[in-house]
Each structure stands twice: as C-alpha cells, then as structure tokens.
Image: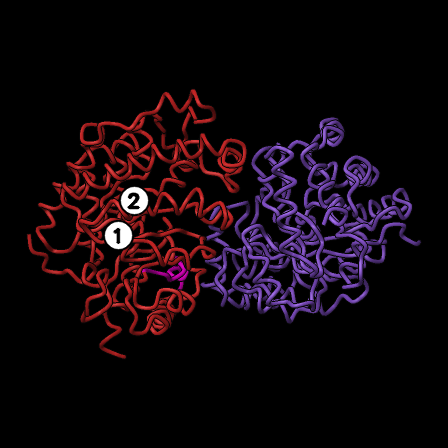
Chain colours: A red, B purple
Amino acid sequence: MNLSNDLIIKAAKGQKVERTPVWLMRQAGRILPEYRKIRNSLSGFKELVETPHLAAEVTIQPVDILDVDAAIIFSDILVVPDAMGLSYEMIEKKGPLFRNTIQKEKDLNSIKIPDIEDNLSYVFDAIKITKKELNGRVPLIGFAGAPWTIFSYMTEGQGSKTFSKAKKLLYQNPKLSHDLLNKITETTILYLKCQIKSGVDMVQIFDSWAGILNKEQYLEFGMKYVKRICNAIDEVPITVFSKGAYFALSDMANLNCNTIGLDWNMDIENAKNIFGNTKTLQGNLDPCALYSDFKTIEDKTNLMLNKFGNSRHIANLGHGLYPDINPDNVKCFINAVKAYHKNN
Amino acid sequence: MNLSNDLIIKAAKGQKVERTPVWLMRQAGRILPEYRKIRNSLSGFKELVETPHLAAEVTIQPVDILDVDAAIIFSDILVVPDAMGLSYEMIEKKGPLFRNTIQKEKDLNSIKIPDIEDNLSYVFDAIKITKKELNGRVPLIGFAGAPWTIFSYMTEGQGSKTFSKAKKLLYQNPKLSHDLLNKITETTILYLKCQIKSGVDMVQIFDSWAGILNKEQYLEFGMKYVKRICNAIDEVPITVFSKGAYFALSDMANLNCNTIGLDWNMDIENAKNIFGNTKTLQGNLDPCALYSDFKTIEDKTNLMLNKFGNSRHIANLGHGLYPDINPDNVKCFINAVKAYHKNN
C-alpha cells in the first residue's frame, strides 16, 4: 500500500523532505481523554495490549487527534519476556512486576524462545487492523525493548532507580547474563520480523536503561545485542534509542541502523559531529518543556529545530510524554514543527 | 587539633600524597551490621539523625571497621528543608515523603531561612562529639544537598524517576523557582558554615538529581546556586558531586571548589582533560562492581587507579554504597586502593 505521508520514512533513509516529520514517544496513551475512556472500560493495561481491535484504536487516536506523521503500535516491551515464559503484571500507578525473576542457571531453563507468531498473535493482529484502518495515511512504527532493558526487568523484577540486582548479575555471572541476553535477542529478532511481516513500516528499539551501565558494560552487555538485531533486520528502517547512553554515542555510529534517538540531555551539536549525515537523529525536546505556555513551547521547539539545522532529523521528545501533559500543549509542539519551514 | 591522617585534605588541596586516599559515599549505614543494630533499636531513621551521640557513633563505625581515610557525618540532606519549615518523614523501604510541597507563592511564605544553630543543633552536636571521639585519626567531612536537589524534593514531595513535578515548576514559574532556590541557598551556606564552626574538615555538596535537567536548565537552576555556595565557603576544601551532569563538567571547571565528584558513567580521561590539575577528581568505581569476587574487585580498582594515573585523585565509588553490598567486599576495595602504590 502506498503511503500518502511518508515523510518519516524518507527522513529515516536520509532522503530530502519538504519539512521535518514529527511524532512523540508515548503519543498513544494516558494524555488523551479518548484513550482513558477505553482504558477505564477494561480490567487493566494488559487487557488493552492483548485486545487487537482496541490496541489498534488507541494506536490511531493520536493520528486523528494530534495529526502526527506516524503511528506507533500500542503495546509494551514486556510482551517479549511474557511470551518467553516469564509473565508480568502491570500494577496500577507502580509499573510492571514480575513475581518470578531470572537469578540462576535453572531459572534460564524455565524460559524459552517461543513460537512468536502463536504467542504474540495479538500484537500482529493489532498491527494488521491498524494498517488497514490507517489506510496509508501515515507509516506505522513497530518496536521492541533492547535486550539489556528486557534483561533488567527479567532479573530485577520491577522498575528500580539503580537496577542493582540486574547489574549484580552482570558482575556475578557474566555467562548466565550472556546466555539470557542471547535468548532475548533471538526472540526479539523473530518478534520484529513478525511485526514487519504484519505490516509495520519501520521499527524502533528502546534501550530505556542503557544509561545505568558504564561504557564498558554497555558495550559488552547492551550494544553488542542491539548490533546483532540491527544486522538481522534489513526490511525496514531501524531507530535505536539508548536513553542515557551518551558515553556510547560514538560507538553507535557503527550500528547498522538508520536513526539514532537522542534524549533531552544529549547535545545536538555533539551528535551531529559524531554522526555527520550517516544517520538521522530523532528527538529531543525535554518532555517537561510541554508544561510551559504556548509561546515558550514554540520558542523551545524552534530553538531545537535551529540546532538540528539541515541535518537529517525526525522531531520528537527526548523521552516519552508524561501522563499529565495537556494535549493542547502537545498539539502546540507538533504545529510548531510543521510551521517551522514556513517561517525560517 | 592535628590530624594523624590528613591524606584526603592534602589530596583535595592538590598537595603531594604518599598514596591515594579512599572513602565511600554511604560508608556509614545499612551495609554494616553494627549500624543496623543501633538503627533497629530506634523508632526510625530520623531518630538516629537527631540523636547526636548515636549519629556520632555510626559516623565513626566505618573508620573503625573499614579503615577509611575520612569519616562523613551521619545525617540527611533533607534536614535543611525540615529546618526551613517543610518537614518530611522517612518511609521504610520507600524513602522520604513531604506531606506538604511548594507549588505556589503562598507556599513559599510558609518557609523561612531558619535560625540554623538552633534548628539543626543536633547536627552540630553530632559533629562535635564525632570530632572529639575521632581524636584526629582522620578528617571529618560535612555535607549538604545542592539547592536544586533540595528544591526537587520540596516541590516533588518524594523521590521520582522523572522529577516531572519539580521540572514543571521550573518551566511554569521560573520566578518562584529562583525565589525558592535563593532561600535554600542562603540556608545551605549558613548550615555549612555552622558545620565548619563545629569542626568538619571539609564539605561535600551532593547534587543527586543534577542529571535529570538538561544543560541549559542545570546552568540556570543548578550550577548557579552551587557556585554561590562555593564562593561563600573558603574555610575548608569543598567537593561538588553533580550526579549525571556530564554535560556540565566543563562549566564546573570555573567553580571555586577543590574537588569534583565523578559518577561511574563519567569518563576519567575526559574529566582529566577538562580539569587538568586545577581540581582533584573523586570517584568513580561502579558501586555494583563491589558485588564481584575479590579478584575482580581488585582488578577493577586497579584499572580505575591506572586511569586516574598521577592526576589529583580521591578514590571513592561513583555513587553511594548499595545496602546489600558485603562489607568484606568494601574492605577489598579499600585495601586495593591502599596497596596500589606498593605494586605499581
């Protein structure tokens, strides 16, 4: 199917675009009253993730309401460990919780590289419905967690400020750590390939906890596996977002991916120097800037766009939208990106 | 009183030392069974902080047990907002909680620059007892939170992954933010001066949440006030530890302080290039490295010391000790630092 708006695909490939495309991490979700209405009619977050027609509906909401240049399939990175046999619950206002975690060799035996098509059919069904309903209006982004980030939940069991249990395992049992990371990586490659087969137009790998490792450990336990995923996927453009891993940006220049996500702390000038025009950069307004008044949001968006200048760029925040951000302020950001080329 | 071991003072001042001095952030506390015994006999964490002879006792424990080159007074950065009229509770296993927070101008009127000597006498009494009992064995370090970090708790009300409420205030009400930061800064200067008068030999400023701001905001709302504190204190050496603020390291070269703390993500070579020999660097082993076996701890400690080389250095972790780290592993780290010059 031809896309009537393929700005983001062109930008990812480094092709000339008439204006900078824009979407927002977590654009589908809690900021929209339309989302909360659906969510509140269900037993919980996982029911929404696992109900394809509803997941498709909330995926498309920001395209209709916010007029972004891409949809991203509504799901969760933790469906992967779930499919591998380590199930999680989503605790309201607290986040994910795994009652069992991977600590020893025997725990590793209890998880498997699953039959992805079967185990995660609800994701692929949601993608197929979304693609049909989007009808080519904008591209659909698929995604997965990076192996290190998935590993950190599977070993820590929940969110953490330090992820010291996950890191402890890297120090105490590097072999077990690599074995687990290998299993996650194999599963993730199969998962992304099935997403692509189901219709997604590009994919993003989220390494949300990259920044709690030091450079040496991130290269060994993080980037190594991201690299393997990038090398395995050549069907669609890939974005890698390693939050906090400023220390590994120059190593990421070697990744076989199209786009590098920048968090709001990362220096745009520095990233341009590192990547030149070999990669597209995505980001990176501070999500909290969207708490400002319209004038300030416009100014900060323009300032960001000025800094990216003529380099390959997809506009986004430097982190996901926070739940209490007003949708009107999100629209202000999107409109500012779209208006930019007219004024400058 | 003369100090029989003044390695850390000399190192902070850039004087020649026979070996690298070593201490650990959070060395007094939960890792030591001797600490837990005292702590468990009390109603809560705050009782310990507010009982001078017990605070002194746990301050000295790591000097006796671990043989570190400095003691750091056992206290909490949140005694400052407490003294300003915004009280907190320490919730077991959760962390600090402020039932009231600063959100509007009228909230600011309810807090004051307190009579420090009176309101925080328990800290100064603990310092005096500690100094007497240490009897010159090692220097005593005093400390305070940096204004931005204190601000983040006073506005957010508790720990947070994003501190989006605190950051929201910076965007929505910069004037109120600066007014609050000014009050905190004035209080902190008085507080540190009283600590020095009571006997501490050096002071450290902890900016634990520096890394959640972008560079522009950290310079405006963070560093500006740290700078003012550094300029107001000239009695003893000052250490500034801005966790996560890698993007501001080059700006910190202008601070009127002796030592810069590095977290475990920060690149030692880069820091040496920025600071030359104008500052002493403190840090920066990953605290999780202390979960390793002795051989690995020794190797990683030696590797770190090799990287610092002949530059001005105080050995420490890149973050506080985590509660479940074995004291024997901490001793292994300390002994590795002390043995280093003999072997290399």
**Crowd class of label 2 (few under 14; some 14 to 19; many from 20; radius 10 Å):** many
Residue B9 appears left or right of B30? right
Evaluate if marks 1 and 2 touch, with contact meaning CB atoms under 8 Å apart: yes
Q: Quadrant of residue B99?
A: top right
Q: Residue at x 93, y 54 (%)?
A: B1
Occupied quadrant, residue A300: bottom left
Q: What amino acid is labelled 2 in the image? A: Ile
**Mark 1 residue crowding within 10 angstroms, few (<14) / some (14–19) / many (20+):** many
Up the image or down, A338 lies above or below A225; here it is below
Q: Is residue B300 visible?
A: yes
**For the residue marked with disc 1, what is the amino acid?**
Ile
Which residue was labeled with disc 2? A229
Q: Chain of mark 2?
A: A
Helix, strand or loop under label 1: strand
Q: Is residue A72 magenta?
A: no
Residue plotted at (39% across, 47% down) = A223
In magenta, the rendered stretch is A282-292
